[in-house]
Image (cartoon, coloured by chain):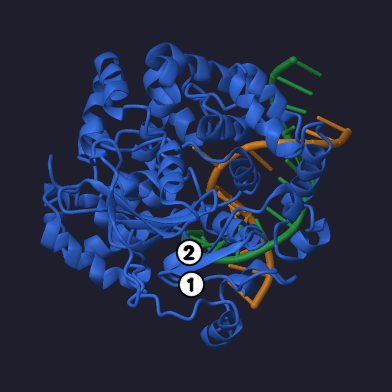
Chain colours: A blue, B green, C orange
DNA sequence: CGGTAACCTGGGAT
DNA sequence: AATCCCAGGTTAC
């Protein structure tokens, strides 16, 4: 497995790029499952897989610049192209940025190897799969986002290794350090997965197809606000909400048509009102965000320090502390704990994980409904099977359930029941 | 304490 | 066209 896993290229295309997506299938896909489908089937599959998961980034223009004016998310995220460009003009850097790969033509960025092979970090399995809503696809196998105050693109090169470039940074060395920290690079995915595979044959098989699906180490405040937006919501709208909030941060630059900002500080966050968020379409989550920001500001050392200090605590203490914030329940707390607070064995239990658990770990519970108490049982079961990095295993199993990934797996691995509207697409016979 | 309904919104299905 | 249902949930009865 020295080449980039090409089956992943296609999974994250957009509707608008369906034609390009198909080309990629033909040219680079070495897995048998897609080859044998006819065009209509592939289109149907791709469409279905993307229907609820893909971020709207590539099919809608980027958000207007700061400050976010009170308007609905719909208007914010689908402005008329003309008005967008004109409202951008004032803040945009003068140099021309290549919309395809983020290169500035007058000042080409330098791509630097990260010393991470694809088996350690696979970008399409790590960035658009629900851990963060802030990274944008800015090219084939390329994602762009912000770590601290560094605007960074990551991409796979030909042999599958990951390279990065710093579009904007105060210090190249600090940028690299921050990036490696953000990528949890000190954890060897290969080592961790070896353990999982030893105790779970199905994991071992999935691992062959999902290599490099890594858990990030995000900034806790950024992670918290993102997952406050996630409750009872879909990826598309979550992304729009997160974009809206992000506009309160400092503008760093534009890559591939997307504007990037540092994540707003507590101070910047406290400038928004609940009313403003409601007008922007946040719904009942508006009061959660305002309430959480207020609650954090009341902490003696400041909210950001308080959040960071949770990294020192045990999982249950972390969950309890997070659940004291308005809008944070067990599921959101587990996401924050796993994706930003070094709680590698936190298990966010959602309906997907519930399906997996009742099928493979707790068959006795099959058929019953997911309650808070039962979700505790699920978490225990995961930890006792996979150990102290159980959250990392859960992430892989979760990704395997995403419609966009599922259709790319061999049939025998797609065993957990699907929701109604995807099942017909996924059951197309492979000729 | 465990089960239930309401909560905002937008998109797709019926 | 009107309505229902759902989306990685949380809170208040």
**In the rendering, at what x and y percent does residue A101 appear?**
32, 68
Q: Nearer the viewer, residue A234 or A135?
A: A135
Say which residue appears at 76% left-offset and 45% top-offset: A288
Labels 2 & 1 near each other (Cβ < 8 A): yes
Residue A221 falls in which quadrant of the image?
Answer: top right
Position of A395 with respect to A170 (left or right) is left
Residue A423 seen: no
Q: Nearer the viewer, residue A12 or A148?
A: A148
Residue A402 falls in which quadrant of the image?
Answer: top left
Q: Please, is residue A402 above or below residue A393 in the view?
A: below
Say which residue appears at 25% left-offset and 31% top-offset: A207
Which mark, by number, is residue A109? none
**In the rendering, at what x and y percent does residue A171 appear?**
46, 51
Q: Disc 1: which chain?
A: A
Circles 2 and 1 on the same chain: yes
In what element is the residue under mark 2? Answer: helix
How many other residues sit within 10 Å of disc 1, few (<14), some (14-19) or many (≥20)? some
Q: Nearer the viewer, residue A173 or A95?
A: A173
Residue receiving disc 1: A60
Residue A5 seen: yes
How many other residues sit within 10 Å of disc 2, few (<14), some (14-19) or many (≥20)? many
Position of A395 with respect to A69 (left or right) is left
Residue receiving disc 2: A56
The residue positioned farthest toward the top in the image shown: A384
Q: Please, is residue A312 above or below residue A212 in the view?
A: above
Structural distance between the alpha carbons of marks 2 and 1: 6 Å
Q: Disc 2: which chain?
A: A
Position of A410 with respect to A286 (left or right) is left
**In the rendering, at what x and y percent does residue A81 appear?**
52, 84
The N terminus of chain A is located in which quarter? Answer: top left
Q: Please, is residue A108 above or below residue A30 in the view?
A: below
In what element is the residue under mark 1? Answer: loop
């Amino acid at each position: 497995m020295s080449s980039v896993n090409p089956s992943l290229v296609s999974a994250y295309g957009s509707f608008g790029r369906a034609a390009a997506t198909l080309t990629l299938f033909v040219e680079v896909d070495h897995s048998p499952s897609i080859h044998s489908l006819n065009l209509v089937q592939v289109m149907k599959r791709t469409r279905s897989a993307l229907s609820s998961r893909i971020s709207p980034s590539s099919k809608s223009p980027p958000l207007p610049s700061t400050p976010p004016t009170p308007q609905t998310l719909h208007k914010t995220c689908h402005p008329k192209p003309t008005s967008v460009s004109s409202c951008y003009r004032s803040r945009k850097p003068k140099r021309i940025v290549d919309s395809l790969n983020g290169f500035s033509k007058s000042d080409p960025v330098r791509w630097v190897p990260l010393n991470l092979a694809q088996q350690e970090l696979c970008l399409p399995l790590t960035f658009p799969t629900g851990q963060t809503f802030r990274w944008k696809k800015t090219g084939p196998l390329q994602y762009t986002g912000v770590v601290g105050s560094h605007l960074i693109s990551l991409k796979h090169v030909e042999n599958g290794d990951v390279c990065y470039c710093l579009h904007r940074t105060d210090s190249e060395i600090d940028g690299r350090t921050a990036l490696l920290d953000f990528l949890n690079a000190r954890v060897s995915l290969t080592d961790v997965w070896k353990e999982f595979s030893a105790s779970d044959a199905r994991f071992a098989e999935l691992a062959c197809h999902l290599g490099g699906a890594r858990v990030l180490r995000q900034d806790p405040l950024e992670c918290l606000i993102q997952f406050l937006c996630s409750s009872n919501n879909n990826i598309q709208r979550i992304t729009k909400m997160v974009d809206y909030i992000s506009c309160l941060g400092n503008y760093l630059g534009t890559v591939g048509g997307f504007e990037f900002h540092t994540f707003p500080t507590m101070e910047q966050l406290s400038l928004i009102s609940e009313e403003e968020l409601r007008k922007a379409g946040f719904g009942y989550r508006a009061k959660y965000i305002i309430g959480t920001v207020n609650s954090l500001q009341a902490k003696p050392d400041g909210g950001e320090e308080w959040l960071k200090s949770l990294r020192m605590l045990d999982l249950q203490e972390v969950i309890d502390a997070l659940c004291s914030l308005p809008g944070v329940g067990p599921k959101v707390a587990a996401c924050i704990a796993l994706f930003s607070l070094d709680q590698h064995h936190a298990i966010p239990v959602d309906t997907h994980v519930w399906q997996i658990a009742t099928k493979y770990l707790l068959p006795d519970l099959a058929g019953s409904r997911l309650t808070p108490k039962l979700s505790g049982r699920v978490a225990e079961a995961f930890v006792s099977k996979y150990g102290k990095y159980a959250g990392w295993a859960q992430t892989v199993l979760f990704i395997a359930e995403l419609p966009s990934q599922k259709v790319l797996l061999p049939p025998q691995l797609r065993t957990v029941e699907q929701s109604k509207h995807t099942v017909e697409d996924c059951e197309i016979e492979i000729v």
